[in-house]
Amino acid sequence: MLHERIAPTITRCSSGCAGLDDVLGGGLPIGHFYLIEGEPGTGKTTLALQFIAEGMKRGEKVLSSVNTQKRPYMNT
């Protein structure tokens, strides 16, 4: 007899971007840290600000750390 397997429900939070939330299956899984990296102009800061604004709208505490300086040991 086959039994249906039910995947555990993952609690998610909105990224602040409805389209991205759809792709991610409802948002980002909670309880994790996320590093967003990429080339200049790809929307990293915009995504971070949308995520922060969504959290603030929901009354959550938010923290953002931004580093925009290149380090000598980084490949450019």
Image (cartoon, grey):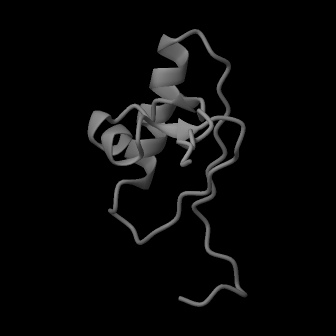
Q: Quadrant of residue 25?
A: top left
Reply above or below: 11 against 20.
above
Identify which residue is drawn at 46% across, 24% down. Answer: 53
Residue 63, percent from left and from top: 68, 32
Residue 57, percent from left and from top: 47, 12
Q: Residue furthest left?
A: 19
Total count of labels:
0
Q: Quadrant of residue 50?
A: top left
Identify which residue is drawn at 46% across, 23% down. Answer: 54
- Identify which residue, 54 or 22, lies in the foreground: 22
Question: In screen coordinates, is 53 left or right of 30?
Answer: left
Reply above or below: 26 against 33.
above
- Identify which residue, 43 or 17, lies in the foreground: 17
Reply above or below: 41 against 2.
below
Question: In screen coordinates, is 61 left or right of 48?
Answer: right
Q: Residue furthest front?
A: 1
Residue 34, percent from left and from top: 62, 51
Question: In screen coordinates, is 4 left or right of 34?
Answer: left
Identify which residue is drawn at 62% across, 74% down. Answer: 70
Residue 31, percent from left and from top: 72, 37
